[in-house]
Amino acid sequence: NAGVTQTPKFQVLKTGQSMTLQCAQDMNHNSMYWYRQDPGMGLRLIYYSASEGTTDKGEVPNGYNVSRLNKREFSLRLESAAPSQTSVYFCASSQTDTSGYTFGSGTRLTVV
Amino acid sequence: KNQVEQSPQSLIILEGKNCTLQCNYTVSPFSNLRWYKQDTGRGPVSLTIMTFSENTKSNGRYTATLDADTKQSSLHITASQLSDSASYICVVSGRGTDSWGKLQFGAGTQVVVTP
């Protein structure tokens, strides 16, 4: 099925550990995004990639890095996880900024 | 302060009844407004997208309205079904280079449809 695939679906990390969240889309979209969703709050943009080869900071980039590996893949890395990074992370893609976004099913991350 | 406010925070409705969700925003200049449905444990799924020149758009039993002058939108669900139980999220996109890729998300309205 066409769409956005995120791995893993669940992860528990200890404080200070690192990990990479993977995201891939098969719709040939130009733009990709990483969001986090916390209880009682709207989704917040961490980083985005307007097109292959470019990345930019969003609203809450501290503690994260990203890589746009190719047009299909956009990964999010936590170098030294902190409890404040406990959240649900969503990857999304779109053809343009004004077109509809397609979201992945999310990664639920717990940092203890 | 969040630029997109949704009300109510949650509501419970009987199967078959109608309901209306509200969204107020302060994002300016405005490009478009979107409504998403998010089932528990899943990513948001797009229901409608409206530009400032559109004042209503439907997707099956979902009808969204937009008043760009008052910066208000509503989502009306007709003849609710159990599968409508979800969080409904209002999302506003600004216009301009500084707004690129930076959608403003509301916190969502949690709808529970009971038999």
Image (cartoon, rainbow, N blue to C red):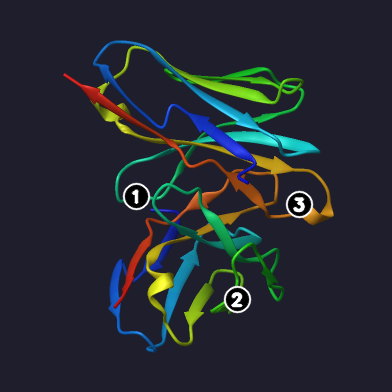
**Mark 1 and mark 3 in contact (Cβ < 8 Å)?**
no
Q: Chain of mark 2?
A: A
A46 versus B50 height, above or below? below
Q: Chain of mark 1?
A: B
A36 versus B5 height, above or below? below
- Mark in the foreground, 3 or 2: 3
Query: In whole angstroms, how far apart are the C-alphas of marks 3 and 1?
Result: 26 Å
For badge 3, the amino acid type reads: Ser
SS type, badge 3: helix
- Mark in the foreground, 3 or 1: 3
Tell me if mark 3 has few (under 14), some (14-19) or many (20+) residues whose alpha carbon lies within 10 angstroms of its own: some
**x 37%, y 68%: residue:** A86
Marks 1 and 2 belong to one chain: no
Task: Say left or right for A75 vs B39.
Answer: right
**Mark 2 and mark 1 in contact (Cβ < 8 Å)?**
no
- Report which residue position mark 3 lands on: B99
A38 versus B67 height, above or below? below
SS type, badge 1: loop
Question: Residue B66: horizontal and vertical position, in percent?
Answer: 65, 21
Marks 3 and 2 belong to one chain: no
Task: Say left or right for B25 vs B30.
Answer: left
**Mark 2 and mark 3 in contact (Cβ < 8 Å)?**
no
- Report which residue position mark 1 lands on: B42
For badge 1, the amino acid type reads: Arg
Tell me if mark 2 has few (under 14), some (14-19) or many (20+) residues whose alpha carbon lies within 10 angstroms of its own: few
SS type, badge 2: loop
Task: Say left or right for A102 vs A83.
Answer: right
- Report which residue position mark 2 lands on: A70
Question: Residue B10: horizontal and vertical position, in percent?
Answer: 36, 30
Dot 3 or dot 1, earlier in sequence:
1
Q: Nearer the viewer, residue B20 or B37?
A: B20
Residue A12 found in image quarter: bottom left
